[in-house]
Amino acid sequence: MCGMEKTGTMHAWEQEGISGPDIQMIGKALGGGFIPLSGVLPRSKIFDAIAEGSGGAHPVACAAALEVQRIIRDERVLTNVQKMGTELERLLRDHIGPLESVGDIRGRGLFWAVEFFQDRQRKTPFPASIRLCHRILDKSLNLGLNI
């Protein structure tokens, strides 16, 4: 699972009780979508073996990322993600879960997935020709939802 900050912790793996991956890629959330920026977070033993190149440490992008991360910390955004995630889970399970076509609802924080099936028992998918994803997206956008 990915989704920096979307799961209620800075990195999704922090909720798994592990020490983290040897190499982690981070992207859009690092700069809050204000500036294109991505990064690699390697363990020390890997970082020490990598030679520096000319494609890193863009000062403006790094300054933007630092400010975004400061705001996330100071405004307790992750605490709000956890709170809103609990509410989102309740709403999804209460309002969408009972629908005949919903097979599974899973996620954490504000990072959720809903699986739809034509036949829930047999886990038969809807035919691509009915464009279910597009129809759900269009309806959601018309309701003012960002999915």
Image (spheres, helix red, strand yellow):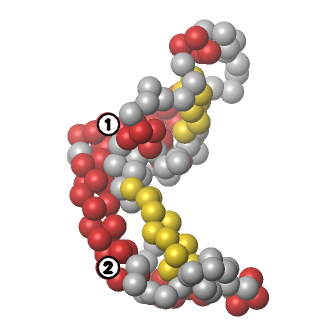
Q: Which of 42 and 89 is in front in this view?
A: 89
From this view, report whether residue 43 is shown above or below residue 139: above
Disc 2 versus disc 1: distance between alpha carbons? 35 Å
Q: Which residue is drawn at 32% across and 79% down?
A: 94
Q: Which residue is drawn at 44% across and 87% down?
A: 99
Question: Where in the figure is residue 135, as x and y percent of width and height?
Answer: 60, 87
Question: Where in the figure is residue 48, as x and y percent of width and height?
Answer: 60, 9
Q: What residue type is labelled 2?
A: Asp
- Note whether residue 141 is visible: no
Question: Where in the figure is residue 12, as x and y percent of width and height?
Answer: 44, 43
Q: Nearer the viewer, residue 97 or 7?
A: 97
Report the residue marked by disc 1: 70
Report the residue marked by disc 2: 94
For disc 2, the neighbor class at 10 Å (few under 14, some 14 to 19, many from 20) is: few
Picture quadrant of residue 121: bottom right
- Look at the numbered disc 1 and give the secondary structure of its residue: helix
Picture quadrant of residue 45: top right
Q: How many marks?
A: 2
Horizontally, is 30 left or right of 123 in the view? left
- Look at the numbered disc 2 and give the secondary structure of its residue: helix
Q: Which residue is drawn at 62% across and 86% down?
A: 118
- Note whether residue 45 is visible: yes
For disc 1, the neighbor class at 10 Å (few under 14, some 14 to 19, many from 20) is: few
Q: What residue type is labelled 1?
A: Arg
Which mark's residue is nearer the viewer, 2 or 1? 2
From this view, report whether residue 54 is shown above or below residue 39: above
N-terminal of the pair, mark 2 or mark 1, is 1
Horizontally, is 60 left or right of 89 in the view? right
